[in-house]
Structure formats: structure tokens, C-alpha cells
Amino acid sequence: MSHEHDHGDLADMYTQETWDARYAESDRVWSGNPNPRLVEQVEGLTPGRALDVGCGEGADVVWLAQQGWEATGVDVSEVALLKAAAHAEEAGVEDKVAWERVDLMAGDELPGDMDLVSVHFMHPPADRFAEITQRMGAAVRPGGRLLVVGHHPADHETGVRNPHGRPDLLFRPDRVLAALPAEEWEVVVADEPTREQTIDGTPVTVTDTVVLARRR
């Protein structure tokens, strides 16, 4: 495979067309439950304005709203956002949430002045990782928090949870920290915890990259 062709395939991974097709394949792609690292890191914080980047079908946004947050979900996929809005209505929190189609890879702006920006399992290409992370951090108000959770490279070694078969997209906490200027951010959590997860009916141990940083 040529490098040029490889780069084209990588670019296709982030388009609205790719994700609309993915979310149109079934009624529900994800479990409908909030990400466990979100629950773990956010419980106990005073609710404010929250932004979930790459919100998918909206489970994290719905959970945040149920905890008292004014939550906005953004995603590149219009199909996902329609499903997310339906999920919020079923949960009775439609008046506490907002949805917006944002294509980060194309340079779209994120809503700003957030007390919490939460990003789960978004894996930008390595050459844009710092830029994308910094743009998500810019949406956090001073005193607010940025939570980034991703698939750890250890998952490539075990053969599970490797997005699109590209180990270069997996990342450790240090890659996130390198993108956040130390004078602007206080690191609260930088960890590589494991947990048990069932994949295709088989229990496996997965490793998460977890970074929680507070904007100074």
C-alpha cells in the first residue's frame, strides 16, 4: 500500500460519510451506558457547562445531564446526533442538552467557555494530535477541566480495541500532556488503568489512557 493511499484511507476514517454509514448500520452501535472513566472522574465535581466531543449516540451527554450538568454533545455524524437527541428525549433530559454537528478535522469551531470538556476514544492522526488536543483544551474556561480518555498502546499488543488496525493512533498520557502547555494546565490525573471488558463474548483486560487536567 502506498503512503499516499494510506493517507487517503486515514482521512476517510474521520468523515461525516464514514460515520453516518456506521451509525446507520444498526439501531444502537454503543451500549447506551456512560463511559466508566467519565463516571469515575466526574462524580463529585460541581455541575456546570459540559461538552462531550465525539458524543456518538449521546450516552455520556445524557448521563451528565442527569447529574445536573448543562451538557452539549458534538459529533461529525448527523445520524449519530439524531440518535442522541432521541436518547435524551427517552431519558427525559432533552431540555438540559444541546447537539451540534462539528467536524474537528475540517477545522470547525467547538462551543467554548466550558467547565468540563470530555473526550472519549477519539484518536486523531499523530501529525494532528497536538493541534486537535489544544483546540479541545481551548474550549475549557479557566478553572475548568479537560478529560481525555483513549485506547492505550498495550491494547495493540493484546490484539483488542485497536481502532481501524492502526497502532499509531493509540496513545499514552504523555502524548496528551505534551500538547498541553504546563503553564496553562495543572495535571490532576495521568494514568494507564486496566479494567475487564467483554468483547465478542470473551472477557479481556483492556488498558485506558486517562488524563484529567485543570486549566489555570
Image: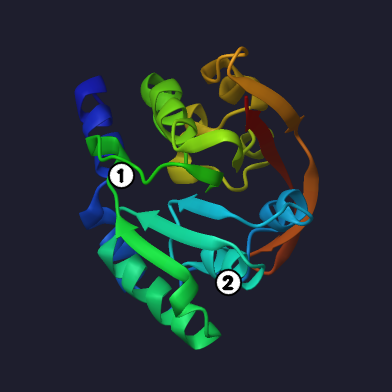
Which residue is found at the position 37% from the left and 19% from the top?
A: 127
* Percent x, y of residue 141: 52, 36
The reply to whether residue 125 is in sight is yes
- 164, above or below 48, in the image: above
Which residue is found at the position 52% from the left and 64% from the top?
A: 61
Foreground of the two, 17 or 114: 114
Foreground of the two, 64 or 199: 64
Q: Mark 2 or mark 1, which is nearer the start of the sequence?
A: 1
Number of residues whose C-alpha sits closer than 10 Å to that of mark 2, classed few (under 14), some (14–19) or many (20 or more):
few
Secondary element at tag 2: loop
* Percent x, y of residue 145: 62, 38
**What amino acid is labelled 1 in the image?**
Tyr
* Percent x, y of residue 191: 76, 32
- 142, above or below 13, in the image: above
152 with respect to 24 (left or right): right
Q: Which residue is mark 1?
A: 14
Q: Which residue is mark 2?
A: 31
Residue 6: quarter of image: top left
The reply to whether residue 121 is in sight is no
**What amino acid is labelled 2 in the image?**
Ser
Which part of the image, by quadrant, shows the C terminus? top right
- 33, above or below 14, in the image: below
121 with respect to 14 (left or right): right
* Percent x, y of residue 95: 45, 77
Q: CA distance from mark 1 to mark 2?
A: 21 Å
Counting the numbered discs, the total is: 2
